[in-house]
Image (spheres, helix red, strand yellow):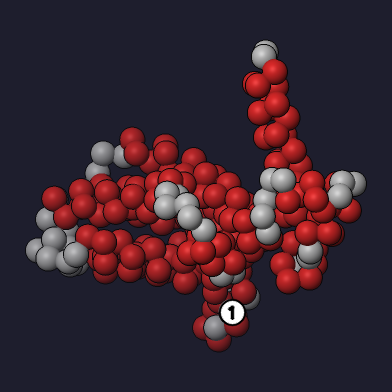
Amino acid sequence: MGVKERKERDRQEMREIILKSAYKLFLERGFDDVSIRNVAEAIEYSPATIYLYFKDKNEIIHALHRQAFEMLNKQFQPLAKIADPFARLSEMGKAYIKFAIKNAEMYKLLFIRSEPMEHLANCQETEWKEGDMAFDALAQTVAQCQQKGYFKNFDTHQFSMMTWSFTHGLCALRLSGHLGRVKEERESNRKLDQIMNETLSTFIQTLQKLKK
């Protein structure tokens, strides 16, 4: 390994150390109560060192945001083998819910907070391949459903946004505790995870009726 390669490896390792420490602090204290100095103290470096890798907290949380989308994309990848696009759309929704529940704190920190998107809006970076890849997987599946005759009179992008918004709404309600406070469900012995999947299935079945 040459000097250049070793320096790049060391740089990537330090970035990961910073990200892991920052993520831990964000979970423990909340985003607003964590400073760059706090992150530096956690890894026993000076704040100046952090600024060599990230210009501010928003850039740190944006990097974590990208990592989370990488994890989500890995959940979607095996579903590409499902030939029937409508069945694949249903399984993608279930995979999204499973991801949100399994990674609850990450989901709340990175997919509900506004800081990652604020950073993206203010930075010069025009590409966001991890986020684009996740949405493209959904949009491509919707487009293939339309080719089969499902909801073909709808705009592909808008329909994809509606499907994502519905599934995200279920996840947000679940993680915030609001889903468990719905009177009908509070009196039921069914698990909330089951409720979410049943609700998603009902939504998918409703979409299926839109076939023209």
Write the residue at 27% across / 49% down. 140
Residue furthest bottom in the image: 183
Front-most of residues 167 and 67? 67
- Residue 204, percent across and down? 31, 63
Q: Residues within 10 Å of mark 1 (few under 14, many from 20)?
A: few
Residue furthest left in the image: 212
On the question of residue 75 being in view, the answer is no
- What secondary structure is marked by label 1? loop
On the question of residue 159 being in view, the answer is yes
Write the residue at 33% across / 35% down. 81
In this rendering, position of residue 24 left or right of residue 87: right
Residue furthest top in the image: 1
Quadrant housing the C terminus: bottom left
Q: Amino acid at mark 1?
A: His
Front-most of residues 48 and 155? 48
In this rendering, position of residue 175 left or right of residue 146: right
Write the residue at 54% across / 45% down. 71
- Residue 116, percent across and down? 56, 62
Front-most of residues 174 and 64? 64
Quadrant housing the N terminus: top right
Q: How many marks?
A: 1
- Residue 90, percent across and down? 35, 54
Write the residue at 16% across / 55% down. 146
What residue does disc 1 label?
Answer: 178
In this rendering, position of residue 208 left or right of residue 22: left
Q: Is residue 188 above or below residue 35?
A: below
Q: Is residue 5 above or below residue 16?
A: above
- Residue 89, percent across and down? 32, 53
